[in-house]
Amino acid sequence: MAANPTMKVANKIFMPLLRSPLHFLVSHGLMLITVTGRKTGKQYTTAVAYVCEGQRVVFFSGRDLLWIKNLEGGAPVMLRLRGKDLPATARLCPAADPDFPRLFKKLYPYLQLEKAGAMVMVSVRFNNL
């Protein structure tokens, strides 16, 4: 499944902003993640809302998005986090991860947990830590 039209518009707004010197306006809660396709080698960059959790960054995504499948089993990614490009490794967390409900509510306090059924949690660890 491709990104919905709302996400395409949001990416057109936030991607340049997150790459600019004005990133601080939104980078406290948004970052860019660049993933390389396993079969095609094509790079996919998208803006995602994130939460820091200890030595990792966590975000949620629709489980049916095409680019998210490239993270199965773990994959190298590049984050644009608070104005810096940081190499990292991302992995999909199991659906039964005990941190899922708590982190989902931390990131999306205004959404009901039932809305998380179509979501997958992604854990990202920095390569230099």
Image: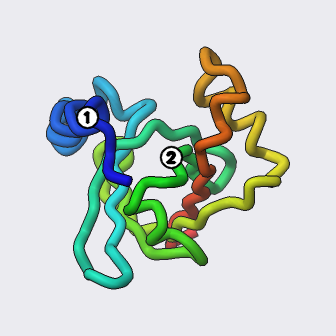
| Secondary structure of residue under mark 2 | strand
Identify the amino acid type marked 2: Ser
Residue in the foreground of this view, choosing between 68 and 21: 68
Q: CA distance from mark 1 to mark 2?
A: 15 Å
Q: Residue at x 74, y 54 (%)?
A: 95
Q: Position of residue 32 (x, y in %)?
A: 33, 49
Q: Position of residue 53 (x, y in %)?
A: 66, 45
Left or right, 17 with reference to 83: left
Left or right, 56 with reference to 16: right
Residue in the foreground of this view, choosing between 91 and 88: 91
What mark, if any, has residue 121 been given in the picture? none
Residue 82: which quarter of the image? top left
Q: Residue at x 61, y 57 (%)?
A: 123
Rendered view: 106 above or below 66: above
Q: Are marks 1 and 2 in contact (CB under 8 Å)?
A: no
Rate crowding at label 2 as few (under 14), some (14 to 19) or many (20 or more) other CA atoms within 10 Å.
some
Residue in the foreground of this view, choosing between 103 and 117: 117
Q: Is residue 21 visible?
A: no
Rendered view: 80 above or below 23: below
Q: Which residue is mark 2?
A: 61
Residue in the foreground of this view, choosing between 83 and 26: 26
Earlier sequence position, callout 1 versus callout 2:
1
Q: Position of residue 25 (x, y in %)?
A: 29, 24
Residue 14: which quarter of the image? top left
Identify the amino acid type marked 1: Pro
| Secondary structure of residue under mark 1 | helix
Rate crowding at label 1 as few (under 14), some (14 to 19) or many (20 or more) other CA atoms within 10 Å.
few
Rendered view: 31 above or below 63: above
What mark, if any, has residue 5 been given in the picture? 1
Q: Position of residue 127 (x, y in %)?
A: 51, 72
Q: Quadrant of the C terminus?
A: bottom right
- Residue at the far top in the pictured view: 110
